[in-house]
Amino acid sequence: MMGKRHDWAKIGEVVRKIRELGLSFAEGAKQFEMKVGDLYEYNRRQNRAAASTRAAAKAAKKATRAKQKTEPRPDGAVKAPVDKETKSVSRLPEDVKELICGYRREHPTHGYKRIADLLRQKYLVIVTRKQIRRVLKDAGLLGSCESSFDAEPEPPKGTRRFEAARPGEIWQMDVAYVYIRKVPVLYLVLIVDDHSRFCVAAELCEDQCADTLIGVLHDACSTYGVPGKLLTDQGSGFYSWSGEQTRFQEYLDDQKIEHLVAEPKSPGSEGKVERLVQTLRKELLRRVKFTDIADARTRIADFVRRYNFDRPHQGIQGRSPTDRFHGVAGDLEQVESELADRQLDLSRGYLVYKAQDHRICIVCGSKGLQVYLDGKLLKEAVGE
């Protein structure tokens, strides 16, 4: 038996009337004595027809553009498609291409964003990730280019990422294990400024008792000032499960430092210092075999110095931690915004540029790159 034929034109009129009255399909079906399934089927048909029309229009537009790109010119030649990526790379100075390739050879695991941030920060050269990719591809250096630069662990869903408003407001402190052959386990005590990610302490110690932790913190306070708050985990050197005050907490009270204790199994709480621990493990501790404690201390100190002064950080818009910690990030952003459309010719050795009422001078010499704003040294990148 054949099914009943539908009068879709009539059903369409009912659907329009239902919408005019502001009724739902269920209410409309009851009022106009129709099957609610027929109303939904009409609506699905209309949506499919509209989608097909949009797809056809998009395909026609794409075909027209392709035809315009290859249509004969008045002289009979055919206009070849333009590779935008190749065109943008061809405008890069050769010395910038050499910088990109040289950095890639030295750091084969660093990604496009990391290279772009370093060029902007160290040489005030603005290069896009696509340009970097093309340069590396042309040089045969593409390989696996992961975006491995410093991002804090994502906080759990439903929580918001926190950041202190200024340097010295909150420090984060943690301890990592370091293993050296034929040497008992060592403890790397790290303290990071929450606002800037600047590492104010990285001390390799033989234990993690309260006196040792107090000594590392005291040295950091003597050098960089006393923070308002200190965030730690619930390690025995920092905190007592019995509720009794530890010697470490007594020191914090004496220095008028508020102690913030992270909840157990909350990996996002100490995201800044945890990220530094991960970076140290990945790029130093798992790759280098230290000969002795002195060698480990030297290499860790060199790594932390590069981290603080040379390393672009995703969490602070590609700046180095020292830019934020010492309050020059805003001045550097002003300089870079003025130079965004200009390329620095490294072969000249200097560039003098006037922006509004300010005079910007960039000098590239034997000591590295120096940036001055109205005669004030803003940035110095010492060549290694």
Image: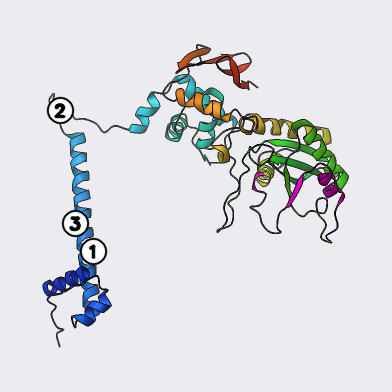
Residue denoted by label 2: 73
Residue denoted by label 1: 47
Mark 3 vs mark 2: in front: 3
**Magenta stretch, residue numbers:** 243-272
Q: CA distance from mark 2 to mark 1?
A: 42 Å
Of the 4 image quadrants, the one containing the N terminus is bottom left
Label 1: how many Cα within 10 Å (few below 14, some 14–19, many 20+): few
Report whether residue 85 is seen.
yes
At which x and y percent is residue 222?
A: 80, 32
Of the 4 image quadrants, the one containing the C terminus is top right
Query: Which amino acid type corresponds to the residue marked 1 in the rendered image?
Result: Asn
> Compared to 168, does 330 lie above or below?
above
Looking at the image, which is closer to me, 127 or 97? 127
Q: Residue at x 15, y 71 (%)?
A: 12
Contact between marks 2 and 1 (CB within 8 A): the answer is: no
Query: Which amino acid type corresponds to the residue marked 3 in the rendered image?
Result: Thr
> Compared to 249, does 127 lie above or below?
above
Check disc 1 and report its element: helix, strand or loop.
helix
> Compared to 137, does 23 lie above or below?
below
Q: Residue at x 79, y 53 (%)?
A: 235
Q: CA distance from mark 3 to mark 2?
A: 32 Å
Check disc 3 and report its element: helix, strand or loop.
helix
The residue positioned farthest toward the bottom in the image shown: 1
Q: CA distance from mark 1 to mark 3?
A: 10 Å
Residue denoted by label 3: 53
Q: Quadrant of residue 273?
A: top right
Check disc 2 and report its element: helix, strand or loop.
loop
